[in-house]
Image (spheres, grey):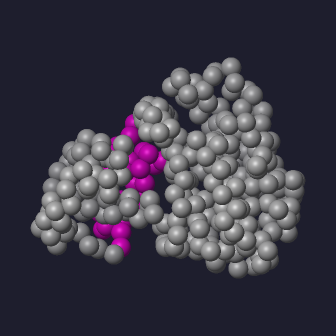
Amino acid sequence: MMEKIAVIGAGTMGHSIALSFALHGYSVHLYDAVEDQLPWARGMMEQHLKDLAEGGLVDPSKADETLGRIRFFHDLKGAVEDREYIIEAAPENIGLKRELFAELDRLAPSHAVLASNTSSLALDDMMRDISEERKKRTMINHWFHPAHLIPLVEMSCFGNMPEPIYMEVENLYRSIGKQTVKVLKPLPGLIANRIQQGVAREVFSLLQQGAAAPEDIDKALQFGPAFRYATAGQLAVADMGGLDIWCIVGDNLLKEMDNSTCANPLLREKVAEGKLGIKTGAGFYEYDPSELEQVRREFNRRLIHQLKASMFYMKR
């Protein structure tokens, strides 16, 4: 059983992945090359632990113990030299990933599994410069943001890794309460992001057409399809509704829906204007600068409630 974890990159995803393992008793090394990033990551984890405690998912008295399981590193060699599972959450740049994997191959123990949090870059491309033996112990493990709250982890099973090693990593994830999806083909976006982009394409198109206000489009999704998706996937929903009905509605609607192959012009316009969402104070909605942290925390609190409700289904 893997017990020693390293997370490479202490940004939005990396610090949250590190916290997920530490919450379940694992020894975690968190590395980042940027000096100021690690204090930021620690502060974010402290806030996450407070929110989890308020939501009843963590014993408040265990917060210091959890953080005590995480050691912070600016030295990559020190961060990985005794680790058994190493996952990188570096920026989505293929050149950077190749260099990083080559360095990890050189510095990490021969038995260590190397993983990437990517969903957009090809595993073969990232592994190009590592040894053939290490390729048998390298995979994609894609988390969703925020990683310490969303249960899903997508796991590549593309033929390079022997089944016993795959199962060892899957058992690691199950031990921290994650729901794993075995991805059998190296498709861009894997599974969940492709589904998400399909929904987003139509949502952006409806807004562009002026079909409804942003809050009503979100409400239609939140209290309609997404309400069911919280407890059942699309294929189960289709079975419950009747495949004959889904076939008829598909024939009637799909020819009327957005089938564009690039980002929606409205989305591109927002990006050009610097309206990137909550991180800039404006996106499809406007955010009061004094309330940004409150908005973020409220979003996470809703996910905490959803996670607690979903635990019933995950334990079945």
> Is 64 drawn above or below residue 5 in the view shown?
above
Q: Is residue 1 in view? A: yes
Q: Nearer the viewer, residue 176 or 284?
A: 176
User: Magenta stretch: dominant SS?
Assistant: loop
Rendered residue at 64%/77% (across/down) = 124
- Count the numbered circles shown: 0
- The answer to if 270 sits in the magenta stretch is yes
Q: Nearer the viewer, residue 221 or 264?
A: 221
- The answer to if 170 sits in the magenta stretch is no
Rendered residue at 68%/37% (across/down) = 24
> Is 290 drawn above or below residue 205 in the view shown?
above
Q: Which residues are magenta?
A: 262-291
Rendered residue at 53%/48% (across/down) = 179
The x, y position of residue 230, in whole percent, is 36, 43
**Snapshot quadrant of residue 165:** bottom right
Q: Is residue 289 in view? A: no
The x, y position of residue 246, in whole percent, is 19, 61
Residue 112 left/right relative to 45: right
The x, y position of residue 130, in whole percent, is 77, 76
**Snapshot quadrant of residue 192:** bottom left
Q: Nearer the viewer, residue 174 or 26?
A: 174
